[in-house]
Each structure stands twice: as C-alpha cells, then as structure tokens.
C-alpha cells in the first residue's frame, strides 16, 4: 500500500508550490509594490495625460523593429539601474512601463518602486498592446 505523506510526495508538492509562487511573483501578481493595468487602461491614462512618462525597457533592436508607444523613452532593462538619474525628474508622477510581453516590465517596475518611483506596469507589454489594436509608433 502506498503512503500518502511520504517525503518524496511532500518534496514534489513543495517544489510545485514554490514554482507556482515564483510564477505569480514574476508576473507581478503577488508581492508587487506597484500597479499593473491592462493596455486599454494604460491607453486611457495616456489620453487623459499626454505628458505621462512612458518607459520602454526592451532592447534597442526591439524598440526599432517592433514599434513602440508614441513618446516612449527607451531604457533597456539591463541599463535601467545605471540610468535611473534620467528619470529622477519624473519621480512624483506615474511612469507607464512596458516591454515585449510583460516580464521585463515587472522587473523594471519592482526596481523603480524600490527607488521611490511610481511605476504602472502595462500587462502583456507591446504584444498585449497590439492585440488590443491600440496605436503604435514606428519611425
């Protein structure tokens, strides 16, 4: 007869629980000290305040090739910590943050929140933005 509380079952269950928690954390669903909004809500924020800061944390190549949100400032995630001074004057207001799919923007939003900024992560990134048929810029 099989034992239901065996060590291996508990170990595997614990690993699955940790993997699930990590997934939720990486998506900004749990333990997030910043707001996340759907692309349509972000678009409404931009329409209400055309001067809102929009931060793109993708690579320069992605920024050029895949389109972007109009007026977005590019600071790739891997450079963000060293370039935070470029955003210092925007510390009091919200900063919309996006990437390709929403993963890097969560990391960027966590970093910004830790440094006293007010990031608002756009769920789904530019992919979600395009899926919602919202306008992009390409120069």
Image: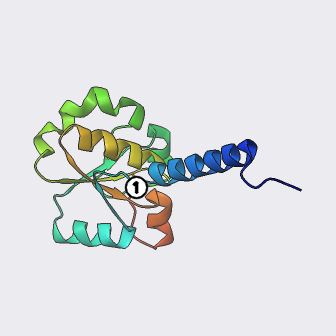
Vertical order, 1 against 19 (above or below): below
| The residue positioned farthest toward the right in the image shown | 1
Which class describes the residues within 10 Å of circle 1: few (<14), some (14-19), or many (20+)?
few
Q: Is residue 138 left or right of residue 101?
A: left
Q: Position of residue 70 (x, y in %)?
A: 31, 58
At x 17%, y 41%, the residue is 116
Q: Position of residue 38 (x, y in %)?
A: 38, 68
At x 47%, y 60%, the residue is 124
Comparing 91 with 139, the one in front is: 91
Q: Position of residue 79 (x, y in %)?
A: 36, 30
Give the total number of marks visible in the rendering: 1
Q: Is residue 37 left or right of residue 20?
A: left
Q: Position of residue 74 (x, y in %)?
A: 34, 42
At x 16%, y 65%, the residue is 49
- The quarter of the rendered structure image containing the N terminus is bottom right
Describe the element under mark 1 as helix, strand or loop: loop
| The residue positioned farthest toward the top in the image shown | 82
At x 26%, y 73%, the residue is 44
The residue that mark 1 highlights is 30
Q: How is the image coloured?
A: rainbow
Q: Is residue 55 left or right of residue 105?
A: left
């Amino acid at each position: 007869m099989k034992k239901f509380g065996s060590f291996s079952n508990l170990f595997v269950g614990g690993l699955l629980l940790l993997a699930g928690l990590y997934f939720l954390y990486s998506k900004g669903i749990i333990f997030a000290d910043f707001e996340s909004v759907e692309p349509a809500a972000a678009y409404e924020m931009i329409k209400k305040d055309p001067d809102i800061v929009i931060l793109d944390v993708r690579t320069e190549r992605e920024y050029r090739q895949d389109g972007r949100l109009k007026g977005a400032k590019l600071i790739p995630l891997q450079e963000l910590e060293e370039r935070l001074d470029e955003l210092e004057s925007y510390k009091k207001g919200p900063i919309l943050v996006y990437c390709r799919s929403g993963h890097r923007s969560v990391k960027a939003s966590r970093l910004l929140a830790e440094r006293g900024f007010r990031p608002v992560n756009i769920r789904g990134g530019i992919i979600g933005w395009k899926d919602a048929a919202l306008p992009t810029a390409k120069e």
